[in-house]
Amino acid sequence: MTETIAATVQPGASDDVGEARSLTQDAWRSLRKNKIFWFSVLLIGLFVLMAIWPSLFTNKDPGFGDISNVRERPSSAHWFGTDTQGYDIYARTIYGARASIIVGIMASLTTLLLGGLIGVLSGFYGGWFDALLSRVTDIFYAIPLLLGGILFMASFPNGPNSSYFLVVAKVVLVLSIFGWPTIARLMRSSVLQVKPNEYVLAARALGASPWRIIRSHILPNALAPAIVVATINLGVFIVAEATLSFLGIGLTPPAISWGVAISDALSAIRTYPHVLFFPSLFLSLAVLAFILLGDAVRDAFDPKSR
Amino acid sequence: MADVILKADNLFKHYPIKGGVLRRTVGHVKAVDGVSFELQRGETLGIVGESGCGKSTLGRVLMRLEEPTSGTVNFDGVDMYSQSGSAMRKMRRDIQIVFQDPYTSLNPRKTVGDIIGEPFEIHPDVLPKGGRKAAVKELLDLVGLNPEHINRYPHQFSGGQRQRIGIARGIALRPKVLICDEPVSALDVSVQAQVINLMEKLQDELGLSYIFIAHDLSVVRHISDRVGVMYLGRMVELGTEEEIYQRPTHPYTQALLSAVPVPDPTMRGKREQIVLTGDVPSPANPPSGCRFHTRCFKAQDRCKTEDPELLSRPDGHGEHRSACLFAEPRVIVETIDVTDLEPDARFASTETVDQDAFAGGDGRLPADATSVVERSHATGESEGPLDRPNDTHRLIDNDPAEKRDPSV
Amino acid sequence: MTTTTKSAAPASSYKPDADGRLLEVDDLHVEFHTPDGIARAINGVSFDLHEGETLAILGESGSGKSVTAQAIMGILDMPPAVIPSGSIRYCGQDLLTMPEEQRRKVRGPEISMIFQDALSSLNPTFPVGWQIGEMFRQHRGMNKSDAYAQAVRLMERVAIPAAKERVKSYPHQFSGGMRQRIMIAMAIALDPAVLIADEPTTALDVTVQAQIMALLAELQEERKMGLILITHDLGVVADVADRAAVMYAGRIVARAGIEDLYAQPAHPYTRGLLESIPRLDQKGQTLAAIGGLPPNLTRIPQGCAFNPRCRMAQDICRTELPALRQVGQQQSACHFAEEVLNG
């Protein structure tokens, strides 16, 4: 009922004389008013800054372990205390952001590209092509992300001398391989929703090429949900990375990551909970930030609120 | 006469119905099931029928948005369905379509300039790049919208204005034929007339031929020169506007006409009503023989087996095409010829410029309305929105009370 | 089927007044609080409805005609809707101040409504017979089998073929016309005194529209219901209504007996509408359109809301709101109603 009301309230082009407002601008306008959006952006900004430039936050060396000072409680010298090896927890938590952020962003981007491509193609072309791609998608979709990750990482273990970036790349690869189906399915269904619109028919009637139709009509209208889910997935990938590292098959010491730190802290969880607390807190905050951002963006793009 | 621009011959469009685990074809929806007609240059051919009769599918097959199952369309001497690639693309310049829904027919993420300019992008050889913006503004002006609004987005316009934008896109490449698929049925009553008048004006100015697909028999009568009536994928009657509305010979046409309410309470109870029983059968499983026999008030045993062809049959005055074995004319609608009557200009006008597009925030005409008047003159308007004083002679010339007298 | 005592309706505690007046809407206002501001959907609407009468409320989208119906039914979503003032009296009792409990007992047995879109108004997960029977279970405390029997009786009444076999079918198994019949069956189930039909045939084909309108007229005759027909279709109104009220921007701008409304409209908007519709029974007609658009309800123009589109508008129309007043046999809210009428 209220929808019909809203529709009748909306028209009246004479209201906004001369001013052009795209849907994206409208979405931005409502995002700007959203406090949760700014909160999550602030948090994500901080984490990204930590990942790029950790020395901005701390001048301690995360690789320097002071054996005489293990498991110290937080103090002015060591804000978050020190861990079982005498490393400064604050410094290691800051430096640990890099692995999480890189893995999250890279895995999200690859799944968005791969899943998006497959979803668009199968939604747009349909027929046997769609049937084939959809079955492949289903097969990958049936394997839980973490199980796939564990299997893959256990089958191709890291050598003792594997470089940091090689290991990170491997984690990104495995998360992408098992993470794209969500995006592909979502993209396919939103392409199927956009395709029958008369503006797509109109473009076909004008003789537009499939590429042109996809690029200028389908993608701009079908992308929003996929971007929202990719943002939320970013948090999921960060958790997956931490879990793999925690299990000892993701990043392994001497690499610094929240997952590794949590794993290390486990041996003394009862007596020295602060060793576990700080890396876990940062991990949770990072995941929360991306999920909140995803939610805020979804609300802004939701056609029902337009 | 006899200058045919488009000729459809025995068009079929069947959609397979898939069923079972293996998605085998278990039947066909016979959306268009053997339709033939011709469109003369410069005329409007109305296609009427109820939902599910296949009229929209016909439009899409004619546009080649869907490939026909069989049949041919000869467009201006060329066989349309044998064209491929660039030849087909080139042909698309000459035949365009306007859609029903003003809300889904424009891409919400594009500006009006992008939308109306897209035809020029797809056919870059029509117009050099530098001239496109000017061409888009000219088109906006032609359809009665404010050319200043070129950078706005579709959601900033009303339904009627959006439909004008859709029409501008359709005529951008100066096609010879425009297929209009229910172009006014989503619009409010008071806005419908604006768009219909605009379409008539454009037809005169650009020499367009229209195929006007609609379910509203009154609108179709108003705009069409000839009319085809469809039922379950078939054309059951085809003739001039006068033949179809004044001397219908097919029982379905007669029932359809009798069901349309006339906005005249004095006719209540006096109009002949043919009430059809039941619903339209499924196009997946149409009745044998004459498809209308299951609902027809005249049906005989012959109708169940014999499939009547669309042939010229006498209508009492001459003859026109009808697909009924027992075709006979019957007057359903008492027609009044009002050709000489002018509408009362004090209450409504025949202008085709969208007033609101030029209006300020309060909906009134802007102070620089002289430019609007000039503009409307430039586009061949006889009267601008502001030259009301010039209309006064009409007030004196005509007696408005008489004009609207329903008992004429 | 033997008639059991259960099918007999309990005597209604509501009685129309001496004139047979059922419903009296007085100076009703409805606003919607939207992010874009306050949309004034209804701005002082008054009308009444008598037994056995058909009142048409005519208007375009956004005129407030559907909101009026929803306000009477008490199905407006509040918020965003707010009813700042006005009253809706049913048989003398104000529905707006009535406790919700009591009002629920009015909705269905006394006043009921049918909607434009029968498909989305029926629940797809229950058989139609169950949904019709629901009325009896809810309001009359009937058991399941009696309710089903009543459903069959009603489906037969609205001429659904093979009602007994189809009572357990689901809504999607019926055609559009049949679904609208099911909606009507539900609406008349408890023998209401007032039936509100909101664009009941807009989604239907003309031949089906004719069937449905005939059915409604027949039921009204049989049950002496007061019928409020909400529509934009001037043809349908001419065919069935006794009186009509024309709404524009949340106000009634013209009200008249049906013949006067068409033969001698006293408001420029009504005149304009009649000029602008193509007619089946005329050839060579020159269509004249009302220019412009209905106003945005968040900023209704000063003075007469129709003034920006009115070709007769003078200075007074832009400043002073014309009241609905008697002009000859009818009522019009126009400063120049006499000129329009005699025009």
Image (tube, coloured by chain):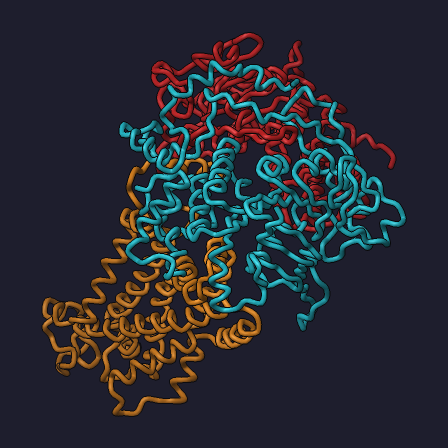
Along the viewing direction, whichever of C92 and B345 lies nearer the viewer? B345
Give the left or right position of residue A287, taking residue C294 as reference: left
Q: Is residue C22 visible?
A: no
Give the left or right position of residue B249, taking residue C294 as reference: right
* Residue occupying image coordinates x 80% and y 51%: B308
Write down the quadrant of residue C74 in the picture: top right
**Residue with the most extreme right position:** B301
Give the left or right position of residue B188, taking residue A267 as reference: right
**In the depicted structure, whether residue A143 falls above or below residue B205:** below
Give the left or right position of residue C76, taking residue A66 as reference: right
**Residue with the most extreme bottom position:** A160
- Residue C254: x %, y % from top left: 52, 18
* Residue occupying image coordinates x 60% and y 59%: B74
Chain C drawn in what color?
red
Q: Is residue B193 visible?
A: yes
Write down the quadrant of residue A164 in the picture: bottom left
